[in-house]
Image (tube, helix red, strand yellow):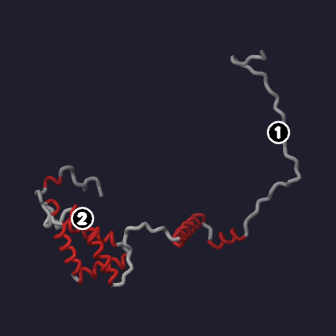
């Protein structure tokens, strides 16, 4: 994006007010009516099929799907953000139960899942492979070096330790130097 293609300050004030759906009052202000509208919409076989296929084949969790549905409703002026926050648990549970009914195993989106050990090892292996490519070393050479480690020669144990030559002390000089008192 170039510097000259960005909107200028105050450009949004040049469009007519209430031009977008979110600038007007929402269609529904009652959370119960919003729940009824969302559940009615999600009960449509085509819509439910689209939601469940998205959950199954994209791997997103139910929480993310619920947020997307509710943000779309806010953007289209169906209800406000706060009504969306109130109805979110009901919509989430509806989608979760529908997925369970059709035998889908989908992620709920709430618990923090620890990274599996195999995933950690795969990440480490990919990093090691990239490092070997940078160093121009083949994996076979690296494995060969690991199996046959290079042992550094140790100095002989029988040799006496080397001593530093004695240092003769120079007499102290300067303003603060004084002799024995």
Q: Position of residue 99 (x, y in %)?
A: 33, 80
Q: Nearer the viewer, residue 123 or 138?
A: 123
Q: Nearer the viewer, residue 11 or 47?
A: 47
- Identify the residue position indicated by label 2 in the image: 86
Going by the image, does 85 lie left or right of 171?
left
Give neighbour class at mark 1: few <14, some 14-19, many 20+ (Cα, 10 Å). few
Disc nearer the start of the sequence (2/1): 2
Q: Residue at (72%, 18%) from the top-left corner?
A: 177
- Identify the residue position indicated by label 1 in the image: 164
Residue farthest toward the left in the current orientation of the protein: 16
Toward which corner of the image does residue 124 lie, by quadrant? bottom right
Toward which corner of the image does residue 52 lie, by quadrant? bottom left
Q: Residue at (25%, 55%) from the top-left corner?
A: 6
Q: Residue at (21%, 73%) from the top-left corner?
A: 38
Residue 39, above or below 150: below
Residue 21, above or below 108: above
Q: Nearer the viewer, residue 147 or 119?
A: 119
Q: Residue at (74%, 20%) from the top-left corner?
A: 173
């Amino acid at each position: 994006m170039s510097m000259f293609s960005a909107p200028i300050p105050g450009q949004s004030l040049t469009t007519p007010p209430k031009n977008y759906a979110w600038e007007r009052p929402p269609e529904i202000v009652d959370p119960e009516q919003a729940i009824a509208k969302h559940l009615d919409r999600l009960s449509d076989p085509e819509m439910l099929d689209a939601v469940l296929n998205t959950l199954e084949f994209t791997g997103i969790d139910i929480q993310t799907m619920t947020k997307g549905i509710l943000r779309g409703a806010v953007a289209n002026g169906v209800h406000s953000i706060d009504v969306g926050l109130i109805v979110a648990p009901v919509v989430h549970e509806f989608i979760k139960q529908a997925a369970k009914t059709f035998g889908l195993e989908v992620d709920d989106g709430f618990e923090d899942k620890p990274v599996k050990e195999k995933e950690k090892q795969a990440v480490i292996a990919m990093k090691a492979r990239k490092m070997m490519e940078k160093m121009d070393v083949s994996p076979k050479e690296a494995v060969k070096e690991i199996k046959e480690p290079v042992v550094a020669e140790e100095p002989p144990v029988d040799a006496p330790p080397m001593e530093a030559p004695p240092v003769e002390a120079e007499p102290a000089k300067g303003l603060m130097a004084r002799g024995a008192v």
